[in-house]
Image (spheres, rainbow, N blue to C red):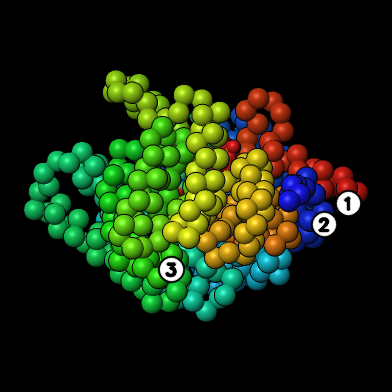
Amino acid sequence: MTDLQLDFQDTAIAFSSKSDKELKKTARLFSLMNKKWLVDMGSKVGLAAFKYKLPFASTLVEATIFDLFCGGKTLLDCQPNIDKLRDFQVNTILDYGAEGKDTEEDFNLTMNENMRGIDFAFHNPSIPAISTKITGLTHTPLLEKMHAGLTLTTEEEHQKQSLLKRVDVICNKAAERGVAVFIDAEETWIQKPIDDIVNLMMSRYNKNRPIVYNTFQMYRTDRLSFLKESYSHAKSGGYILGAKIVRGAYMDKERARAAEMGYPSPIQPDKLSADADYNAAIRFCIDHHEHIALCNASHNATSNQLMASYIHEKGLSRDNPHFMFCQLYGMSDNLTFNLAKAGFKVAKYMPYGPVRDVIPYLIRRTQENAAVTGDLSREYQMILKEVNRRGI
Ligand SMILES: Cc1cc2nc3c(=O)[nH]c(=O)nc-3n(C[C@H](O)[C@H](O)[C@H](O)COP(=O)(O)OP(=O)(O)OC[C@H]3O[C@@H](n4cnc5c(N)ncnc54)[C@H](O)[C@@H]3O)c2cc1C
């Protein structure tokens, strides 16, 4: 069989959904984000504004980067963006951006918003899934205590039962509606209870098809073996393993905490080791795709090419329901649109919510796109290439 080589440099396809005006606006914003000092300063001001609920922050963010990385403030706001992606055979995964919440009332609000997302997805064939975060549904200190195996107080036991109920209500509704639920992976010191809850939900709701997905961070040294273990449990338990594979978002924080507290870092020693486990995980999921539904959530061109090539090499169908590629809204359009054009199932993670609530998420995106070494970011280079190609 011949090799499959996708052209991720094809910017004409990558930015086909953007008009000249939209592309120029995007280029201007990425050029600003490319200035590290500006991003550093903006992040500090943004976080302070978020903390103290300063009104000007929302206005500023809304006028600049909100549209670039978020679908809208509400589900209905997102609809035109969802439709636009669908016109290019790109699906949407709804991601309600609740962060930094800490009351039972907030957690119930997040649960209700997730339920609304599931209903909305049910009526939209191009939305196969919603995404949620366990820290949006309960207190982080509770998760820390559960992770450490400490005895819970009566109140904490009650909070734990409320969490289980919330997650179950979401997954139950998702199963009824045939919509998948992707559950984020978070910091290592709270991940065990997250894994336990997700495994429980998968054993309940993934008997016939993948509804619930866990997330596996391959920058962790122990996750390739955990993926294999999860597969064995799923197989013996008679359910499908939903596996979203990521590299991991909290590397600096993880390393700093390990160094400060004097335990071995859970993170791979270098990027090459993280990449090697990432790619091994993708191959493992494809090799066992009858029992694993895989979502390759990455902006790394090599890992996306690897999955496409491996599906091709094994003679498997590109639109197999157990294979999905996924990138964040507003990023790596060169991967998303070229994969979709080649007939693979690909989706954008689309965050939405009140501007104030998504500020921490937006700060992470701007930091990711800031030039660290003085070079232009991967994203900005692609945008400039297309601006030049169009001669605008
Ligand atoms: C759709 C989607 C969903 C996501 N969901 C989650 C989630 O639930 N939980 C989560 O934690 N993250 C999540 N992420 C973020 C993800 O984990 C990565 O941070 C991000 O995508 C960058 O990795 P990459 O594979 O795209 O590309 P790359 O640019 O190739 O990789 C960068 C990543 O490699 C790793 N890395 C870099 N340097 C080193 C080093 N020296 N040693 C070891 N590792 C290194 C880090 O993880 C870094 O983020 C998600 C990303 C996407 C696209």
Compare residues 35 and 264 and report the one nearer the observer. 264
Badge 2 crowding class, 10 Å Cα cut-off, few under 14, some 14 to 19, many 20 or more, is: some
Depth-wise, is mark 2 or mark 1 nearer the camera?
1
Tell me the kind of residue under disc 2. Answer: Asp
Q: Residue furthest bottom?
A: 123
Q: Which label was assigned to residue 390?
A: 1
Q: Which residue is tagged 2?
A: 20
Residue 63 position within the rendered picture, expressed as x and y whole percent measured from the top left? 63, 54
Q: Residue furthest front?
A: 1
Task: State which tag comes first along the sequence, 3 or 2.
Answer: 2
Q: Is residue 117 above or below residue 293?
A: below
Q: Residue at x 21, y 61 (%)?
A: 162
Q: Are marks 2 and 1 in contact (CB under 8 Å)?
A: yes
Q: Residue at x 56, y 28 (%)?
A: 272
Q: Is mark 3 within 8 Å of ligand 1?
A: no
User: SS for tag 2?
Assistant: helix
Compare residues 173 and 36 and report the one nearer the observer. 173
Tell me the kind of residue under disc 3. Answer: Arg
Task: State which tag comes first along the sequence, 3 or 1.
Answer: 3
Q: Which residue is tagged 3?
A: 209
Residue 98 position within the rendered picture, expressed as x and y whole percent measured from the top left? 41, 56
Badge 1 crowding class, 10 Å Cα cut-off, few under 14, some 14 to 19, many 20 or more, is: few
